[in-house]
Image: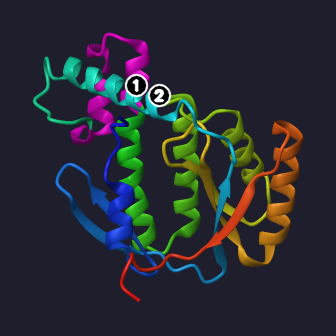
């Protein structure tokens, strides 16, 4: 009953080694961007928290965005929030009656803009710039979309405070689940130890850490 999207399935089917995918979920148009990590690793951090409310809250956020869209459509000829630039949103957000829905829509619009900037950063080989966008994304997910929670915020904040980290953010639906970080290869061991120490002290149990590689999608062996 979760009104989720197609991103996970698309990545599984269309993944390409050492590349990120820019996917337009409205049209399923996609493009690849090089994502070669020579001196860094992708670290996935599992909060190990059961996400009992994730489904209902996910649906709630989607409904809030849809309501915001309907308010905007009273004056704007748009089919989705993804069609708005940040400037257009700022000029018309007063049309959204609910302040909470304004925040939800703001996240959707600005996250879309960040995603397009991320494509530019990857194509230009600017991993540091990409990492900063990851950080900005988490802040928006925390403050405007409000889908993070103590566990994810603790992990991401601790990750930001470690040396050799380009960026970190939650991933997935939120309310638990996983975060992701880009970390210098020679600092991954200390990164895991220090982040987990902060997490255990704050939450009371350990996180799990996995070093991932950007590979091809699922295929027959």
Q: Is residue 132 left or right of residue 220?
A: right
Report the span colored magenta.
82-106
Q: Nearer the viewer, residue 27 or 218?
A: 218
Q: Nearer the viewer, residue 123 or 69?
A: 69
The secondary structure type at the circle numbered 2 is: helix
Q: Is residue 27 left or right of residue 10?
A: left
* Position above or below: 109 against 169: above
Q: Nearer the viewer, residue 27 or 137?
A: 27
Residue with the most extreme top position: 97
Residue at (27% x, 20% y) in the render: 67
Q: Nearer the viewer, residue 99 or 87?
A: 99
Residue at (77% x, 48% y) in the render: 158
Residue at (50% x, 76% y) in the render: 214
For disc 1, the neighbor class at 10 Å (few under 14, some 14 to 19, many from 20) is some
Q: Is residue 183 left or right of residue 163?
A: left
Residue 162 percent coordinates (x, y): 79, 57
Q: Are marks 2 and 1 in contact (CB under 8 Å)?
A: yes
The secondary structure type at the circle numbered 1 is: helix
Instruction: Report the quarter where the C terminus lies.
Output: bottom left
| Res 119 quadrant in image | bottom left
Q: Which residue is mark 2?
A: 57
Magenta stretch, main secondary structure class: helix
For the residues marked 2 and 1, what is the alpha-carbon distance in whole angstroms?
5 Å
Colour basis: rainbow
* Position above or below: 119 against 86: below
Q: Which residue is mark 1?
A: 60
Residue 35 percent coordinates (x, y): 47, 75
* Position above or below: 151 against 221: above
Residue with the most extreme bottom position: 221
């Amino acid at each position: 009953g979760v009104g989720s999207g197609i991103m996970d399935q698309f990545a599984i089917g269309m993944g390409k080694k050492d590349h990120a995918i820019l996917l337009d979920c409205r049209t399923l148009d996609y493009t690849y961007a090089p994502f070669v990590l020579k001196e860094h690793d992708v670290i996935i951090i599992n909060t190990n928290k059961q996400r009992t409310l994730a489904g209902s809250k996910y649906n709630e956020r989607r409904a809030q965005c849809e309501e915001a869209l309907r308010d905007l459509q009273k004056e704007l000829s748009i089919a989705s929030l993804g069609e708005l630039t940040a400037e257009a949103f700022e000029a018309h957000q007063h049309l959204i009656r609910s302040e909470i829905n304004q925040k939800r829509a703001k996240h959707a619009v600005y996250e879309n803009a960040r995603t397009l900037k991320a494509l530019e950063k990857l194509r230009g080989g600017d991993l540091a710039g990409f990492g900063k966008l990851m950080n900005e994304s988490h802040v928006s997910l925390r403050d405007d979309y409000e889908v993070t929670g103590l566990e994810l915020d603790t992990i991401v904040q601790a990750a930001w405070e470690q040396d050799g980290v380009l960026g970190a953010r939650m991933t997935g639906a939120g309310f638990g689940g996983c975060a992701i970080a880009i970390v210098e290869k020679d600092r991954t061991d200390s990164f895991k130890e220090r982040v987990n120490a902060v997490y255990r002290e704050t939450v009371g149990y350990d996180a799990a850490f996995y070093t991932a590689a950007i590979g091809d999608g699922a295929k027959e062996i």
